[in-house]
Amino acid sequence: MLSSTALPSLITTSTSFMSTFDLLSTTPIPLTSLFPNEMASITTFSSNFSSTISPVTTFPAVHPYIAYARKIYIWLVPVMVSVLTIAVIGNGLIVISAPWLSRPINPYHRLCVSLAAADTWAASLLVTG
């Protein structure tokens, strides 16, 4: 296990391609520190039946912000895609109907069609990711 004094020197002198986060996230974490009551029953069970259960495991630690962002993205991405799809369809109808505007076209209508075309382009880029 890494000590707190060896960690800074290991990070600064590391020549591997592993980032600091990868190094820290694959450090073995003793399960007894996470689940003391459950691990006590496992060690009692294993001593009775002489099985080999190791109370140490490795799993990548997930930063709390990443877990929070994943919860938000689960519902935010579908809502955003549906709103942008509606924007592409609505503004596309305005751009497609522009040839049928009555002549002469006043500057307000030109501005509306131009903004609808720009909004269609931007929404189509955003919806594709």
Image (cartoon, rainbow, N blue to C red):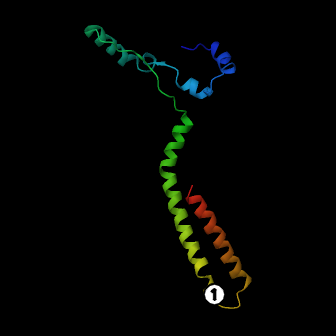
**Residue at 62% across, 28% down:** 19
- Relative to residue 26, is residue 35 drawn left or right? left
The foreground one among 74 and 18 is: 18
Residue at the outermost bottom position? 103
Q: Is residue 28 above or below residue 69?
A: above
Q: Position of residue 8 (x, y in %)?
A: 67, 18
Residue type at mark 1 is Leu
How crowded pointer 1 is (Cα within 10 Å; few <14, some 14-19, many 20+) is rated as few
Which residue lies most toward the right here?
107
Q: List x then y, in percent, for residue 127.
A: 56, 59
Answer with the quarter of the image where residue 43 lies: top left
Q: How many numbered markers are drawn?
A: 1
Q: Is residue 117 above or below residue 64?
A: below
Q: x%, y% of residue 31?
A: 43, 19
Residue placed furthest toward the front: 16
Disc 1 on helix, strand or loop?
A: loop
**Which residue corresponds to mark 1?**
101
Q: Residue at x 56, y 67 (%)?
A: 87
Above or below, comparing residue 7 to residue 19 in the picture: above
The residue drawn where x is 46% and y is 23% is: 58
Quarter holding the C terminus?
A: bottom right
Q: Residue at x 70, y 80 (%)?
A: 110
